[in-house]
Image (cartoon, rainbow, N blue to C red):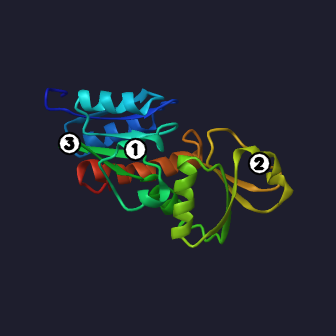
């Protein structure tokens, strides 16, 4: 039952989806937490923060194009943000914004059992930076292909690529891990990072 004590969480993006809504609302119900989660459109970080504070959000997630611009508004942040410089998770506590990046943990947990030695990364935006951090933690070497170099990926063959862009990318000669949220790989990584967000929001381990 939604009431005056219901906690409010959400996500902000210029392309809002349903993955977070499904995961978090199911998780809140599973753990009997009086909270709701909804995705919203936004392309302006200042207005996003004003709205979240005004509506008394307890926390929120960020996607393109807000992950990097939010860095200037955080009051506190966890260690990896110093290297990644892109924040996808904000906890609001006592009016202060506490920033985290759980994208890298989703990527880390997805690839830690793949036994890969080298992966190419396509894109170096907020998510791409988290991928780099995760691969460094896994001791997986990598090259970065910027979006204007996409046409060059088939200059090599039998290699692995991570698509860290919002666009569909195909290859005739290589294996692509497509991390867009509407793909199989992207959905799995999204769930793995959402599990980490759930712990930040609630203090509980999602099992």
Disc 1 versus disc 3: nearer the observer: 1
Q: Give x and y (percent) for residue 139.
A: 57, 73
Q: CA distance from mark 2 to mark 1?
A: 30 Å
Q: Which mark is residue 60?
A: none
Q: Are marks 1 and 3 in contact (CB under 8 Å)?
A: no
Find disc 2 in the rendering and name its residue: 149
Q: Give x and y (percent) for residue 45.
A: 42, 33
Q: CA distance from mark 1 to mark 3?
A: 35 Å
Q: Residues within 10 Å of mark 3 (few under 14, many from 20)?
A: few
Q: CA distance from mark 2 to mark 3?
A: 48 Å
Farthest residue to the left: give it: 4
Residue 170 visible here: no
Name the quadrant of the N terminus: top left
Residue at the image point whose x is 51% and y is 29% from the top: 14
Q: Give x and y (percent) for residue 13.
A: 47, 33
Find disc 3 in the rendering and name its residue: 32
Disc 2 versus disc 3: nearer the observer: 2
Residue at the image point whose x is 42% and y is 56% from the top: 81
SS class, disc 3: loop
Residue 169: quadrant of the picture: top right
Q: Which mark is residue 72?
A: 1
């Amino acid at each position: 039952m939604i009431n005056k004590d219901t906690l409010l969480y959400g996500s902000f993006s210029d392309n809002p989806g349903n993955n977070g809504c499904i995961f978090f609302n199911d998780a809140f119900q599973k753990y009997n937490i009086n909270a709701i989660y909804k995705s919203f459109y936004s392309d302006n970080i200042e207005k996003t923060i004003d709205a979240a504070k005004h509506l008394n959000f307890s926390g929120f997630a960020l996607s393109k194009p807000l992950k990097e611009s939010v860095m200037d508004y955080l009051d506190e942040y966890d260690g990896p943000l110093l290297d990644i410089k892109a924040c996808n998770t904000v906890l609001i506590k006592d009016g202060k914004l506490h920033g985290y990046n759980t994208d890298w943990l989703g990527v880390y947990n997805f690839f830690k059992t793949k036994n890969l030695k080298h992966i190419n990364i396509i894109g170096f935006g907020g998510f791409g930076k988290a991928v780099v951090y995760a691969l460094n933690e896994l001791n997986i070497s990598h090259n970065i292909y910027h979006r204007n170099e996409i046409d060059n990926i088939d200059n090599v063959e039998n290699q692995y690529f991570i698509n860290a862009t919002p666009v569909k990318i195909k290859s005739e000669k290589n294996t692509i891990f497509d991390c867009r949220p509407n793909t199989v790989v992207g959905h799995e990584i999204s769930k793995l990072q959402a599990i980490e967000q759930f712990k930040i929001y609630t203090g509980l381990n999602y099992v």
